[in-house]
Image (cartoon, helix red, strand yellow):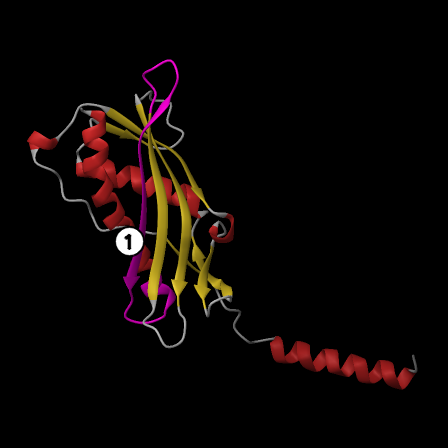
């Protein structure tokens, strides 16, 4: 490589570096999925059985912290500047435990990893978690999850209840803030649907 070529290349690098200096570096924005507060159930609906939240798994395509947007039938993109404050599995597990405990339908609801023994464990697998931002349709938050209640009183644990729920929550606009709020709405709807069923199985 000639000295002239090196000089030109060096000048280009200097120009690019100089342009970058002083330009604000985009800061990532982080979110928590926060469902609406649970309405406390009447005293006659309160049970005594303890429930613990077990494994909450998120399917591989959605298991990262970055928000995911669907652009068309086959294209999904991740947003490097907007994501969850922690991995979605642990965040959702904690939110589920807090919501069910706040509702008051169960004697106590243990957080994932709690050493408190409980005769029943609730597990979940989230199979969809994305913003549907396809052109020509109203933006929506899409959440799908499979719930399973496992009874651990017997010598061999057994599944007492299984239910799959898919929620599509329309959004005012295709923005990260609205998407995460939509996730919270969807999670609240899901828990409101399964809570009576879980209680009925645990107190039959």
Location of residue 199 (image quadrant): top left
Region in magenta: 151-179
As rendered, which of 74 and 43 lies closer to the eye? Answer: 74
The spot of residue 75 in percent (x, y) is 51, 67
Q: Residue furthest right?
A: 2
Residue at image position (22%, 23%) is: 49
- 64 with respect to 170 (left or right): right
Q: From this viewpoint, is residue 84 visible?
A: yes
The spot of residue 50 in percent (x, y) is 25, 24
- Position of residue 169 relative to residue 137, above or below, is above
Q: Residue furthest top?
A: 155
Query: Crowding near pointer 1: few (<14 within 10 Å), some, many (20+)?
Result: many
Q: Which residue is mark 1?
A: 186
Residue at image position (29%, 49%) is: 187
| Magenta residue check for 171 | yes
| Magenta residue check for 40 | no
Residue at image position (67%, 76%) is: 17
Residue at image position (61%, 75%) is: 21
As rendered, which of 49 and 155 lies closer to the eye? Answer: 155
- Position of residue 21 relative to residue 178, above or below, is below
- Position of residue 180 relative to residue 18, above or below, is above
The spot of residue 162 in percent (x, y) is 32, 36
Q: From this viewpoint, is residue 28 visible?
A: no
The spot of residue 7 in percent (x, y) is 84, 83
- 11 with respect to 43 (left or right): right
As rendered, which of 19 and 176 lies closer to the eye? Answer: 176
Query: What SS does tag 1 mark?
Result: helix
The N terminus lies in quadrant: bottom right
Location of residue 56 (image quadrant): top left
């Amino acid at each position: 490589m000639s000295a002239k070529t090196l000089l030109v290349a060096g000048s280009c690098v200097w120009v690019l570096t100089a342009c970058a200096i002083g330009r604000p570096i985009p800061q990532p924005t982080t979110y928590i999925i926060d469902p609406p507060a649970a309405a406390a159930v009447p005293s006659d609906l309160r049970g005594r059985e303890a429930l613990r939240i077990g494994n909450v798994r998120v399917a591989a395509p959605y298991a990262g912290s970055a928000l995911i947007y669907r652009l068309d039938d086959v294209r999904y993109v991740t947003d490097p500047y907007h994501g969850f404050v922690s991995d979605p599995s642990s965040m959702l597990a904690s939110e589920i435990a807090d919501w069910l405990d706040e509702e008051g339908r169960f004697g106590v609801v243990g957080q994932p990893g709690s050493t408190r023994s409980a005769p029943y464990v609730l597990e979940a697998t989230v199979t969809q978690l994305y913003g549907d931002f396809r052109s020509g349709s109203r933006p929506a938050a899409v959440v799908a999850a499979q719930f399973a209640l496992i009874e651990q009183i017997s010598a061999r644990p057994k599944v007492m209840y299984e239910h799959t729920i898919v929620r599509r929550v329309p959004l005012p606009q295709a923005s990260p803030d609205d998407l995460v709020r939509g996730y919270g709405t969807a999670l609240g709807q899901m828990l409101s649907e399964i809570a009576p069923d879980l209680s009925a199985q645990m107190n039959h």
